Every structure is written in C-alpha cells, then in structure tokens.
Amino acid sequence: MACCTNSKPFFTLINKVMIKKYTYILLIVLFIFGIGFIIHKAGRSKDQYVYYQLQERKGPLATEPGWEGTKATVQELYRSVEELPKDIKAPLQLATIFIKEARVSGNFTYYDMAAMRQVDYVLALDSSNFQALTYKSLIYLSQHHFADGLAIATKAMQLNPYNSFIYGILVDANVEMGNYAAALIDADKMVSIRPDLRSYSRISYLREIHGDYPGAIAVMKLALEAGIDGDDGTEWTRVQLGHLYENTGALDTAAFEYAQALAYRNGFAPAIAGLGHIALVKKDYAKAIAYYQQADMLVSDYANKENLAEVYMLSGNIKTGDSIANVVVESMSKDAASAIGNQNIGHYVDRELAYAYLKINDYDKALDHALAEYNRRPQNIDVNETLAWVYYAKGDYGKALPYIKAALKTNSKNPLLLSRASLIFEKAVTYSHVSH
C-alpha cells in the first residue's frame, strides 16, 4: 500500500512536466502559425494591393484647377484603404481617378495598371461587383485586349442591363472586334437609356464607319451640345467633330473646331495635334512640326511621334524622321513584349507596329505584326486595311486584294481608305493582266 500512497506526488509531477512540455510545443506552434499568417498577409497585400501615386503632369495640365485637390484625395483614399481594407468604395474611387488620368496624360501604360490593381482588389472581395467589372472591361479596351473587354462587358451587362455606360463599352468592343451589327444594336440600347454626349458620339462613329458623313457630323454636333464646354470629354468630342470635317475636306472648319477646343481647354493635346495635321495637309511643314512637338511634350502618345517622323521625312529631313521612327518602333516593341509577358494588362500594339515598321521600310516585320493583329480580330475593317496596305508595300498586290475588299465592307468613305483601295485595285488589275 506504501507504493500506492507515494504514487500520487509522482504522477502529479509527471503531469506537470507533460503539461509544461505541451504548453511549450503549443506556444511554438502558435508562434510559427502567427509568423506564417503575417508573412501570408504581407504577401497577399503585396500581390493584391499596390500603392500607385499620381505622376506629375506637364505644361498647362499641371496648373489646372483641382489638380492639387486630386492629389490630396488620392492620399485620403489610400488612408481609407488602410483603415477599412474590406470597404470597396475607396479602391473604386481610386480606379476612377486613374482611368481619367490615363486619358488626360496619355500615360496609359502606368495608369491602366494602377486602375487594374484597384479593380482586381475589389473583385477579390466581390466578384460580381458591377462597377469593378465595368472598369475592368474599359481597361482591357484601353490595352487593346478587345476580346477580353467584350467578354467582361457582356458579363457586366447581364448583371445590370439598364446601364447606359456598359452599352457604350459594348459598342466600342464590338466595333473593334468587327461585330458591326451588334455594335448598332448596343448603340440603340445606349441612346434609348441615356441620350447624351457618350451615346451620341458613338452613333456618330457608327454612321462614319458606314459612310454617312453628313449624319455623323449632325449627331456629333448633338453630342457636343450635350456636353459642358471645357470638360475633357466635351473637348475630345469637339476634336472628333474636327476630324469629321477634315475627312470631308472642310479643313478651315476643322481648324476652327480645334482652335475652339484649345480656347476652352488650354494645352489640350488632341486639338494641338489636329492643328498639326491641318498644317501637314497644307504642306506647312514647319508649323506642323511645331504643333506635333508641342503635343508630344504634353502627353505620351505614339501617334504624335509618328506624325513628327512623317513631317520630317516629307520636308526632306530624312535623317531626323528615321531617327524618330526608330524610337517609336523601339518603344512600341517594349509594350508588345509586356503584352506577351502579362496577358492581363500588357498593351497590344501590333497594328501600330505594322505601320511603324512600314515607315522604316522593314516590310517583313510589318507583315508579322499585321498578321498578329489580324489573327486576333479578322472582322475589323481597320485591321484588314492595315494588312492590305502591308501587302501592297511588299508588292504582293494579289494578296492585298481580299483584305482591302473586307476593309470596304461597311461602305466606309474614309479618304485614306479609299485612296489606298484605289491604288491596290489598280495594281492588282495590272499585275493580273501581266501575269496572264
């Protein structure tokens, strides 16, 4: 019995040792789990949320009223994200700011990525958020991922079939994919829901595509009347009206619209570039160079540099023109590489690269990029025109013929398209007679 009376302290001691041992183990496990959670959380924050700051504007854009306030707002929104990480309002507001700033500055590469980060952050919390899906489709279109943009916009429309803005994105996406009948249906729905600047301007573009310039001009005027003078969207619309006048040969009227846009919005690069094109058409190369240089200093836009290269070449300064054209090719190639490396955000620029390579007489690379774009959207008339023109430049007139015919399928009266078509048809007929 002695052993039994002495066993209680012994087992009590054993129990205390075991409890202490397992407590240590439990603490170690909890410590490891805690460290892992912190690392996971930090990794998730790094992957899902990145702080993008506004880039400084250039020229008159930097002194616009409200710019300093916008920068302060961005900082406030970031503080909101830190304090309320599950709240989706702040990221959506940030996305709105970044999307607008991309259009204003022309720095789409940076701001599209910044906006997409906010959108993806929201969609990780709410995969059916209508505004986030709308923005995602809009950013995809900006990056020329037109098929992806169309798919996301369709999903968003199914969630909210009575929203005008989403039908505008569907119009744009269907036009880029060459689905012109679908684009017309979407435009009708859009204007029936909200007849405003956005819907009228899209109807104008569709009329232009189908060769109705008087109708396109009339509706673009309605779009302009629906806007507020000086607003970015209104002055963009005024510039589009100027382009329509240009294409119908009313150069002085077009120049007036560009000058009006500048009067309402100082330093508006698209209007400055429009005046540059008027000077180019009138063969006032010195003035055209000055306008394009000014526009190029204000916004990041390959088109301004390409136009500069063209003007220099036409004025006889081949060396400078070639130098600028090569810079454009190099910069665009980097964007093309980013598109390959990141399918979600990289900018497809193959159609633009095709024309850039034509300027430096590298026809084989021009063809590679024209075919790459054609394989993505073979129904689009502009893509068919590009491929046809590359084949023409290479002297493959027979190959150019079916593509230029496809480019004319909507009965477009665009003067550049018609002039290229006439050259291709003439060469194709002559080549056909000679070969037989």
Image (cartoon, grey):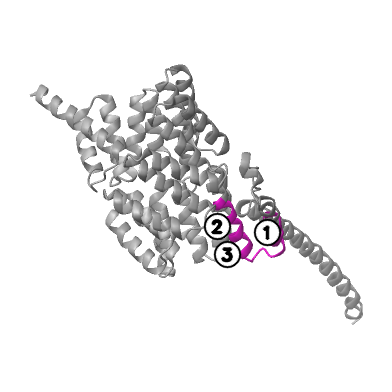
Q: Which residues are magenta?
A: 74-100
Relative placement, left or right, of 66 versus 233 is right
Taking 140 as reference, is 28 above or below it? below
Question: Can residue 346 be seen in the rendering of this structure?
Answer: no
Amino acid tagged 1: Leu
Instruction: Please give the label number shown on residue 125.
Output: 3
Amino acid tagged 3: Leu
* Numbered disc in front, either 3 or 2: 2
Residue 147 within the magenta-colored segment of the rendering: no
* Numbered disc in front, either 3 or 1: 1
Q: Describe the element under mark 1 as helix, strand or loop.
A: helix
* Numbered disc in front, either 1 or 2: 1
Between the C-alphas of marks 3 and 2, the distance is 10 Å
Q: x and y percent of residue 10 in the render? A: 89, 73
Q: Describe the element under mark 2 as helix, strand or loop.
A: helix
Taking 387 as reference, is 189 above or below it? below
Pick out the residue farthest to the left: 436
Q: Describe the element under mark 3 as helix, strand or loop.
A: helix
Q: Nearer the viewer, residue 340 or 303?
A: 303
Badge 2 local density, few (<14 within 10 Å), some, or many (20+)?
A: many
Disc 3 or 2, which lies upstream in sequence? 2
Residue 9 location, quadrant:
bottom right
Residue 110 location, quadrant:
top right
Question: Can residue 183 be seen in the rendering of this structure?
Answer: yes
Badge 1 local density, few (<14 within 10 Å), some, or many (20+)?
A: some
Magenta stretch, overall SS: helix
Q: Which residue is mark 2?
A: 119
Pick out the residue farthest to the bottom: 1
Badge 3 local density, few (<14 within 10 Å), some, or many (20+)?
A: few
Between the C-alphas of marks 1 and 2, the distance is 14 Å
Q: Nearer the viewer, residue 88 or 400?
A: 400
